[in-house]
Image (cartoon, rainbow, N blue to C red):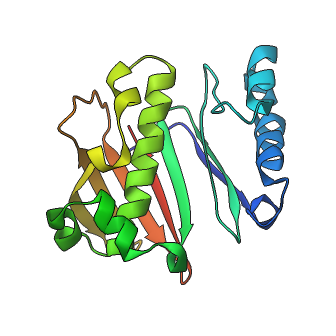
Amino acid sequence: MNFEMLQLHLKSEFSAENKNHRQLIRQAIIENHKQSLTVNEITDIQNLDLIPKSKKIFFSISHHQKIGGYSASFVPHGFDVELKSRISDQIIKRVSTVDEILKSPDIKFLWCAKEAAYKALNNLSLDSLNPNSSDLIISDLQIIDWASQTKTETFSYRISSNKTLDLNRNIGYIFQDSTQIFAIFFA
């Protein structure tokens, strides 16, 4: 896939341990993308009760206790980063099917994959491209078609749902280090 832009901005100061992390992430969005944002978009991005949005760029925010940040792309997407130690099998079993669990390369990937896909679908509903996506809950999404990208130690996946979804790309990627899992999903 050839995307014009995908940026990940991650810093330890954006972690959930910093009580101002939400404001700092949004300040970084504004600072790094101000040339593409309108005055109204900047005002909305500063509002912690709203999902950051722009007519030109899609943003997705994620954080955990050690790191946080955001992704930016010209295409609708969602981003998630999680500490492996904080993803419980109990939660995964509550939002996943038995088939998903059996087919996943790592059960903990399911939470991140679903979270990134859910955020991407919320990005779509912000622009009314897919009004059905606003009715979704995370367990409505099934993770399918896992594929290993052995050269990069990345896995790709797709989603399906019993609810109608209008997806142009429907591709996600998961990668990890020793303590955390990262997921990006392009709707």
Q: Residue at x 26, y 30 (%)?
A: 165
- Quadrant that contains the N terminus: top left
Which residue is depicted at the point 63% across and 33% down?
Answer: 51
Q: Residue at x 65, y 65 (%)?
A: 64
Measured along the vertical axis of the image, is residue 28 above or below residue 168? below
Q: Give the quarter of the image for residue 53.
A: top right
- Where does residue 142 sit, x and y in percent of width and height? 24, 51
Query: Residue 42 location in percent, x, y?
Result: 79, 24
Residue 151 visible here: no
The residue sitting at 32% across, 37% down in the picture is: 169
Question: Is residue 138 or residue 70 the one in the foreground?
Answer: 138
Above or below 86: residue 77: above
The answer to whether residue 187 shows anywhere in this view is yes
Residue 37 % position (x, y): 74, 22
81 relative to 111 in the view: left or right: right
Which quarter of the rendered picture does the C terminus lie within?
Answer: top left
Is 38 located above or below residue 5 in the figure? above
**Residue that sits furthest to the bottom in the current view:** 178
Going by the picture, which residue comes out furthest to the left? Answer: 99
Is 121 on the left-hand or right-hand side of 140?
right
